[in-house]
Amino acid sequence: MNLIVNGKGGAYEEGCRTVADLLSRSEWTGRLVIVELNGEIVGKEVYGDTLLSEGDRVELVHFVGGG
């Protein structure tokens, strides 16, 4: 499936069907993120139920600590 994640297009494996699947990828594991799917914020409680579709635009905003 082709998705646009943080402004970059890419092909994702067939097993990447939900927001939770996308966040389980190694580059996002363990990060605190806010997810926007096609312009709408997705609540953490529905990541596993929120299906991704061909061409979806996903913005993943993660927090970085520092001082």
Image: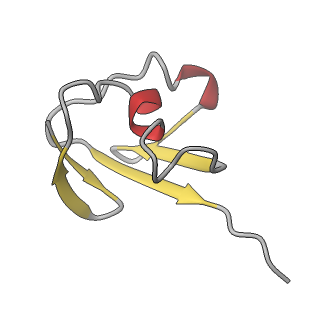
Q: Is residue 2 left or right of residue 20?
A: left
Look at the picture and state if 7 lies above or below 58: below
Count of labels in the image: 0
Position of residue 63 relative to residue 27, above or below, is: below
Q: Is residue 26 above or below residue 44?
A: below
Display coloring: secondary structure
Report x, y in % for residue 7.
Answer: 29, 64
View extreme (front): residue: 26
Quadrant the N terminus occupies: top left
Taking depth in this image into account, of 23 and 42 the one nearest to the observer is 23
Q: Quadrant of the C terminus?
A: bottom right
Quarter of the image holding residue 12? Answer: top left
Quadrant hosting residue 14:
top left
* Horizontal and vertical percent position of residue 29: 55, 44
Percent position of residue 22, x then y: 39, 37
Residue, x 47% and y 39% (percent of image)? 23
Residue 52, image x, y percentages: 29, 29
| Residue at 54% from the left image edge and 21% from the top image edge | 46
Q: Is residue 27 above or below residue 40?
A: below
Which sits in the foreground, 4 or 24?
A: 24
- In the figure, is residue 47 to the left or right of 3? right
Residue displayed at 39% across by 48% down: 39
**In front here: 38 or 52?**
52
Q: Residue lying at the far top in this picture: please name it.
A: 49
